[in-house]
Image: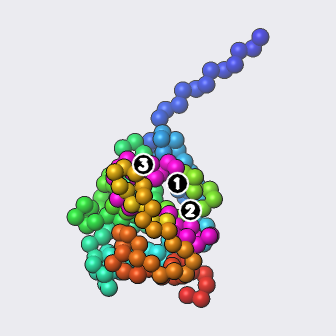
């Protein structure tokens, strides 16, 4: 009787595995597992870009808003043994006065935004929100450009509370960026913007 080959022991996944990925593949380490997916599809990239354009002026540079934030597209962030790549993330400047020159950031953001897609939504909602809560990220947004919704979540006593649920062409004030009005029709783009 033939004996089954013993499985080769695998080394733990680490940041070098992310660095080794081919161009155009986003890699994250969640619960010790390397999760990969391609760069966002055009509707997702457009919504992320448009949202960035709407909040960076007022919140990073103080143009028509309070300033005081650092906002980045797809930053790699180390959360203990996890490495996550939110679509957008923001830090109050006093918490992140300087960006590191290389490697993942090691300061949890004050806000993270995930642009949902059919391939990432499950991990975004279940696993990444849990990690954000464990590391005291105060606000999370779940943006769905296909059904045109924005879920605004606030961390309170370790649990996510829905601070707002918006959609369509509404103009909203969404925490933590509620100092300005955010016209969602501009976020979705692709229409008469």
Image quarter where the N terminus lies is top right
Q: Residue furthest bottom?
A: 192
Asked whether the residues under the numbered discs 2 and 1 touch, taking CB atoms below 8 Å apart as contact, a structural biologist would say yes
Q: Write down the residue under mark 2.
A: 116
State how far apart marks 3 and 1 are (Cα): 10 Å
Q: Earlier in the sequence, mark 2 or mark 3?
A: 2
Query: Magenta span has 127?
Result: yes
What residue do we see at 26% from left, 72% from top? Answer: 68
Q: Which type of secondary structure does the marked residue at label 2 adopt? A: loop
Q: State the image coordinates of residue 11 (x, y, percent, origin top left).
A: 49, 32
Q: Earlier in the sequence, mark 3 or mark 1?
A: 1
Q: Which mark is residue 53?
A: none
Q: State the image coordinates of residue 192 (x, y, percent, origin top left).
A: 59, 88
Camera-side residue of 129 and 11: 129
On screen, 191 above or below 88? Answer: below
Q: Write down the residue under mark 3.
A: 131
Give the class, few, some or many, for how many residues have Cα within 10 Å of label 3's Cα (few <14, many ≥20): some
What residue do we see at 31% from left, 84% from top? Answer: 63
**Do we see residue 170 in this rendering?**
yes
Q: State the image coordinates of residue 168 (x, y, percent, origin top left).
A: 57, 77
Camera-side residue of 30 and 167: 167
Q: Which type of secondary structure does the marked residue at label 1 adopt? A: helix
Q: Which residues are magenta?
A: 126-150
Q: Which mark is residue 125?
A: 1
């Amino acid at each position: 009787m033939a004996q089954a080959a013993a499985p080769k022991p695998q080394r733990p996944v680490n940041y070098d595995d992310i660095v080794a990925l081919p161009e155009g593949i986003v890699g994250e380490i969640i619960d010790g597992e390397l999760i990969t997916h391609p760069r966002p599809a055009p509707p997702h990239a457009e919504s992320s870009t448009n949202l960035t354009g709407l909040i960076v002026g007022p919140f990073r540079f103080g143009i028509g808003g309070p300033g005081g934030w650092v906002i980045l597209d797809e930053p790699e962030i180390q959360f203990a043994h996890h490495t996550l790549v939110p679509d957008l993330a923001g830090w109050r400047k006093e918490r992140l006065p300087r960006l590191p020159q290389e490697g993942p950031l090691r300061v949890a953001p004050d806000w993270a935004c995930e642009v949902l897609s059919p391939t990432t939504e499950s991990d975004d909602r279940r696993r990444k929100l849990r990690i954000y809560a464990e590391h005291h990220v105060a606000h999370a947004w779940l943006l769905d450009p296909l059904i045109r919704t924005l879920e605004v979540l606030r961390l309170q006593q370790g649990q996510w509370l829905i601070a707002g649920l918006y959609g369509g062409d509404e103009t909203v004030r969404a925490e933590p960026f509620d100092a300005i009005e955010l016209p969602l029709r501009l976020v979705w783009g692709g229409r008469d913007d």
